[in-house]
Amino acid sequence: GKFVNVILTINGEDHALDIDPRTSLLDACRDHLGLVGSKKGCDHGQCGACTMLVNGRRINACLTLAVMHDNDSITTVEGLGTAENLHPMQAAFVEHDGYQCGYCTPGQIVSAVGMLGEIADNWPSHVTSDIEGRTDLSGDEIRERMSGNLCRCSAYPNIVDAIETAAA
Ligand code: FES
């Protein structure tokens, strides 16, 4: 088939790609750019392991085509922090053991960062390491707002604790 050109701006860096237009944003990152932090759990929009931020909004990267995101600002887990300088949400997940096998963790963390940006109404908050907290965020609201991110190990209590800590 015919390939098309797209420029993906990911974590502040432009990547020119010549790809099959049917390529999902997730596959473009994982298979073409070596950005494998975002995971493929289901490839059907059901698990959230592939969550990225597009212009600050959460998206299931398996459900969207890379060619639709020319000129968008995309953030993956690789763009949040480094091993030496964790994003506050990453640090909170470490502190609270917000994972067991870890497969869903990148999506959980990106989703949680996007969620806090949404409710603080200051998105795209992901471009800074600061999180504008909202002290009235309840565990129930976190569960509801994070319901698109599944954890097969069922580490949910620790995930919610981590997000509560990061949001405080
Ligand atoms: Fe995209 Fe599961 S891999 S939602």
Image (tube, helix red, strand yellow):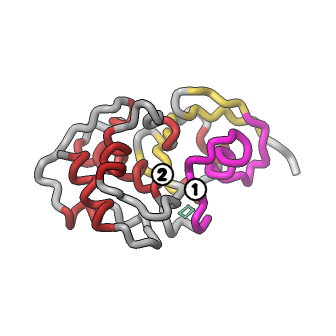
Where residue 58 sits in the image (x, y, percent)? 43, 50
Residue at point 48%, 59% (across, down): 102
Is residue 42 rendered magenta in the image?
yes
Where residue 93 sits in the image (x, y, percent)? 35, 51
Foreground residue among 110 and 65: 110
Where residue 116 sits in the image (x, y, percent)? 28, 47
Vertically, is 37 above or below 101? Answer: above
**Structural distance between the alpha carbons of marks 1 and 2:** 7 Å
| Callout 1 amino acid | Lys
Vertically, is 90 above or below 149? Answer: above
The residue singled out by tag 2 in the image is: 106
Left or right, 112 with respect to 167, comes to right
Left or right, 155 with respect to 70, comes to left
Part of the protein shown in magenta = 17-43
The residue singled out by tag 1 in the image is: 39
Q: Secondary structure at mark 2?
A: helix
